[in-house]
Amino acid sequence: MPAIWETYSRNMETIEEECRKCKSVQKHTFRVYETKVYSFLPTKTERHVTLVCHGCLLESKIPKEQEKDLLKKYEKQILTADGHRFFEKGKYKEALNMYDQALKKDPEFAGAIYGKARTLIAKQDYRGAEKYVETLMSRFPKDRDVNDMNDVLRKYLPSTKNDRIKDHLPKEMENETPLEILKLRYSKGEITREEYLQMKKDLE
Ligand SMILES: [Zn+2]
């Protein structure tokens, strides 16, 4: 089987410095190239960094030593971006693996936390996603995507965690079993028939 090459590039941080072509101070962006060589599995990954001038678009190599330092610095972003790419292809297991590697570099890294939450929700592992969504909600309470994820969790988690149902219950329901609570909520029109049936299934 012939080897297949895939190359991705992504722009990282932007700095200002003098361009050797424009001879003026311009914005420059570091761009990371990543090439994966596949035969059956990805067998090799090569990365390098260029510097792109915003003025004249000259893209130039940077010194090896600086490249090495930058690749180390960008590693969590690169791993996270790889995770996002797997996510887009529906390869959730591989995506989670990338996010975990990024979080090993930096447990606070928001991009990887976000990716992990989104992937776990896509896998319908709402319980697993909970702590990541909570972290994101505490750090980005106004972010639209984060709030959307939180809404999904609120919709699905009560069906698997009884104390959460009870947190929001009127007094009359406090001593009911989860199934009875569910019936009450359905009868009151708080949840749709689909939600009722799904939650009922989850409880059985
Ligand atoms: Zn230039």
Image (cartoon, rainbow, N blue to C red):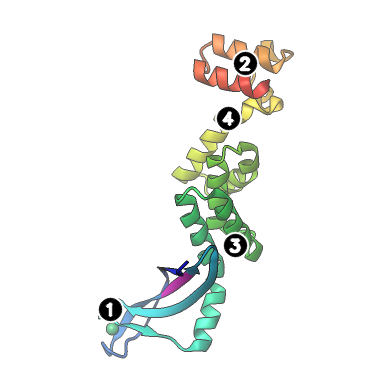
Q: How far apart are marks 3 and 4 (CA)?
A: 28 Å
Mark 3 vs 1, N-terminal side? 1
Q: Which amino acid does label 2 sit on?
A: Leu
User: Is the C-beta of the residue carrying label 1 under 8 Å from the nearest atom of ligand 1?
Assistant: yes
Residue hosting label 2 = 182
x and y percent of residue 152 in the render? 52, 34
**Image: magenta residue range:** 31-36
Residue 13 occupies quadrant: bottom left
Mark 1 vs 4, N-terminal side? 1
Disc 2 residue crowd, few under 14, some 14–19, many 20+, Cα 10 Å: many
User: Is the C-beta of the residue carrying label 4 under 8 Å from the nearest atom of ligand 1?
Assistant: no
Q: In this view, does 87 lie above or below 194?
A: below
Residue 10 occupies quadrant: bottom left
Q: Which residue is drawn at 55% across and 54% down?
A: 95
Mark 3 vs 2, N-terminal side? 3
Q: Residue at x 55, y 29 (%)?
A: 155
Residue hosting label 1 = 57
Mark 2 vs 1, N-terminal side? 1
Residue hosting label 4 = 156
Do residues under tags 3 and 1 come within 8 Å of each other at their CB atoms? no
Q: Distance between the residues labelled 2 and 4?
A: 13 Å
